[in-house]
């Protein structure tokens, strides 16, 4: 189970199984990388596989994937923990409805769970039973290269409720209520439906496990903590003394603790000596061959696993909870853990954790005499002050206001419910994630008033996802994050402007049109796109071929099988024809062909 040779790509865990297409889903994460999120719809919509950097260069494919998935997917993320993308992209604006920022209900807590709940429907028209897939992870929705763990479960909802699924269902149902802003009724209903189906699903269990149950902290009074046991092993990148001490006191045999060197250096020696083994990842395991760890977003251990033995049964807990007070003692953080139970020998799963059958080849013994250089006190204090500033900007109730300036140009302004608490040592600026950071505007006005200008931009660049940079200049420390703000005066033609910018030319129009006709997870027409502009002319004689495109065949196929979807084509044409520049992207001979289908739709409405 824990062999490092068995690896799962995040995108592979989301891709629909054979015979199914994606129907809807929710995800939770503490931190969120917009660039990673931008590529997720491509895999959910089965618009082809590929490396993330390659997909990001294919704006036409990304645009169609986002269009298909936007209304079906909701990602709940801790407010103020959205990362600022390294590169600008107009399509970030289309992710606004997908990202819902939330806060933990308990004071001082963080929203820290990492799950996906996905619903797939069968491509067999006679089957109405959906497939539910749940991913319980230690990984955030980011581009980290850390060592994480993922539990994947699948099953179909039945007629009765499964009591062990209740905590997970409760969390999914509560998600819209944790939001910092308004959540649409459609997304609230999405959460309710998935929560109900999760509660009624009996999971197909992996390996030799005989049962699975779920534990959620941070929503009610009860707090999950590994129960009293005869044996314990812990994998946790972050630990606090009180939490680790309570773990050792609840076990008859504390077998192993696996963590990070900097974490272990903060724990008392006498506490570490309670464990039979204390281990860390070997330096060579921190990065792939030829990679420098300094180039990675995050590296090293990030998995959270607790293994306990009770009688002849092993209990394996995986999920988001670190061995810290906020996670498993006070229970202030919202956390999710899945508990898998199996029969086995006395120490079978403990060996799986730290021996060669599991992570053992990647681990080395931690030297209790290791001296770790303490962090720079000035920078620690600077980071504390920046966190105060992050909270001040996150909690003040910011809105982005747009006002028409000139043709296709908008004046932008940040408006706050009250003046922002920014520590005196901190400077702050902001810009739209669809624009370059060199367009950043100073936020000094927010100290004394409730508004601050944010410059100007084109219609296609308008987005409520705003990047912030706060800096403690004296200590040389800065912090970047993004917020998904409500937009007052969003240009009505914004999405159409993005469409025209991405399509860009007639070749792009044809390419996008073929994807539109391909269906959600249906037929793969992408292979035909490679022959754009071949010898037989722009349409390849309307019949495809080695150098042409199968446009006529695709239109006829959709007319016969799913005539409703031709209305999407009609919508595309209408959006492009809103402006002279957009209309120029549509070839006149295509309009002649399309008129045949328009007449047919009027005579034989679907």
Image (cartoon, rainbow, N blue to C red):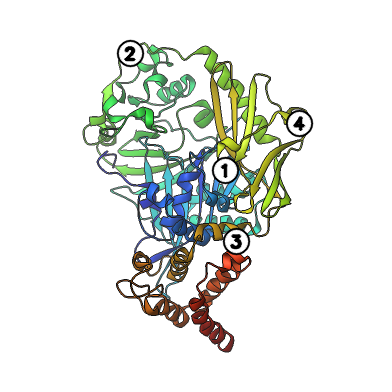
Q: Nearer the viewer, mark 1 or mark 4?
A: 1
Mark 1 in CB contact with mark 3 (< 8 angstroms): no
Which residue carries the number 3 mark?
Answer: 496
| Res. 419 mark | 4
Which residue carries the number 1 mark?
Answer: 435
Q: Earlier in the sequence, mark 2 or mark 1?
A: 2
Foreground: 104 or 492?
A: 492
Which residue: 63% across, 44% down? 178
User: Marks 4 and 2, how far apart in space?
Assistant: 49 Å
Circle 2 SS class? loop
Foreground: 572 or 582?
A: 582
**Position of residue 33 in the picture relative to residue 413 (left or right):** left
Q: What is the x, y in percent for residue 586?
A: 52, 70
User: Marks 1 and 4, how far apart in space?
Assistant: 26 Å
Which residue carries the number 2 mark?
Answer: 368
Q: Nearer the viewer, mark 3 or mark 2?
A: 3
Tally of marks: 4
Q: Residues within 10 Å of mark 2 (few under 14, many from 20)?
A: some
Vertically, is 92 above or below 480?
A: below
**Position of residue 50 in the picture relative to residue 493 (left or right):** left
**Position of residue 428 in the picture relative to residue 321 (left or right):** right
Q: Nearer the viewer, mark 4 or mark 2?
A: 4
Quadrant where the image shows the N terminus: top left
Q: Nearer the viewer, mark 2 or mark 1?
A: 1
User: Marks 3 and 4, how far apart in space?
Assistant: 35 Å
Vertically, is 431 above or below 524?
A: above
Q: What is the x, y in percent for residue 293?
A: 35, 29
Q: Residue furthest left?
A: 356
Q: Earlier in the sequence, mark 1 or mark 4?
A: 4
Q: Residues within 10 Å of mark 1 (few under 14, many from 20)?
A: some
């Amino acid at each position: 189970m824990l062999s490092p040779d068995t690896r799962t790509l995040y995108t592979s865990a989301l891709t629909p199984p054979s015979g199914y297409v994606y129907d809807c889903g929710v995800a939770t994460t503490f931190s969120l990388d917009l660039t990673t999120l931008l590529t997720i719809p491509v895999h959910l919509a089965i618009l082809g596989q590929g490396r993330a950097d390659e997909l990001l260069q294919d704006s036409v494919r990304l645009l169609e994937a986002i269009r298909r998935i936007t209304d079906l997917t909701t990602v709940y993320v801790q407010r103020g923990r959205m990362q600022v993308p390294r590169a600008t992209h107009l399509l970030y604006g289309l992710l606004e409805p997908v990202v819902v920022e939330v806060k933990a209900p308990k004071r001082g807590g963080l929203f820290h769970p990492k799950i996906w709940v996905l619903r797939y429907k069968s491509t067999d028209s006679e089957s109405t039973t959906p497939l539910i897939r749940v991913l319980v992870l230690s990984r955030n929705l980011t581009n980290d290269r850390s060592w994480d763990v993922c539990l994947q479960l699948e099953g179909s909802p039945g007629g009765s409720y499964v009591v062990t699924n209740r905590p997970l269902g409760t969390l999914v149902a509560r998600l819209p209520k944790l939001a910092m802003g308004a959540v649409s009724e459609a997304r609230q209903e999405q959460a309710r439906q998935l929560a109900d189906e999760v509660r009624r699903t009996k999971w197909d269990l992996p390996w030799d496990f005989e049962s699975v149950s779920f534990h959620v902290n941070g929503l009610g009074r009860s707090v999950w903590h590994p129960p009293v046991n005869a044996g314990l092993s812990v994998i946790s990148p972050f630990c606090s003394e009180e939490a680790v001490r309570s773990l050792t006191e609840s076990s008859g045999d504390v077998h192993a603790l696996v963590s990070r060197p900097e974490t272990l250096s903060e724990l008392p020696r006498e506490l570490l000596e309670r464990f039979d083994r204390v281990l860390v990842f070997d330096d060579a395991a921190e990065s792939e061959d030829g990679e420098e760890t300094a180039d990675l977003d995050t590296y090293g251990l990030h998995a959270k696993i607790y293994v306990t033995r009770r009688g002849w049964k092993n209990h394996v807990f995986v999920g988001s909870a670190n061995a810290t007070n906020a996670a498993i003692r006070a229970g202030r953080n919202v956390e999710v853990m899945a508990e898998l139970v199996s029969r086995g020998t006395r120490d079978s799963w403990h060996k799986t954790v730290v021996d060669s059958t599991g992570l053992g080849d990647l681990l080395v013994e931690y030297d209790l005499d290791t001296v770790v250089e303490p962090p720079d006190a000035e920078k620690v204090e600077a980071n504390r002050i920046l966190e105060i500033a992050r909270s001040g900007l996150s909690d003040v109730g910011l809105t982005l206001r747009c006002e028409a300036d000139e043709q296709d140009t908008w004046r932008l302004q940040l408006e706050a419910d009250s003046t922002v608490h920014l520590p005196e040592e901190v400077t702050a600026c902001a810009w739209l994630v669809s624009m370059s950071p060199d367009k950043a505007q100073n936020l000094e006005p927010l100290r004394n008033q409730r508004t601050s200008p944010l410059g100007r931009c084109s219609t296609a660049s308008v987005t409520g996802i705003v990047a912030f940079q706060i800096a403690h200049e004296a200590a040389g420390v800065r912090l970047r994050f993004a917020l998904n703000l409500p937009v007052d005066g969003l240009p009505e033609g914004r999405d159409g402007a993005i469409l025209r910018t991405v399509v860009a030319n007639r070749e792009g129009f044809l390419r996008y049109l073929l994807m539109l006709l391909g269906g959600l997870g249906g037929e793969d027409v992408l292979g035909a796109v490679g022959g754009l502009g071949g010898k037989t002319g722009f349409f390849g004689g309307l019949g495809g071929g080695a150098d042409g495109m199968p446009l006529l065949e695709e239109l006829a196929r959709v007319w016969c099988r799913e005539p409703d979807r031709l209305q999407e084509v009609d919508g595309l044409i209408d959006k492009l024809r809103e402006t002279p520049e957009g209309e120029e992207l549509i070839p006149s001979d295509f309009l002649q062909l399309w008129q045949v289908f328009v007449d047919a739709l009027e005579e034989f409405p679907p």
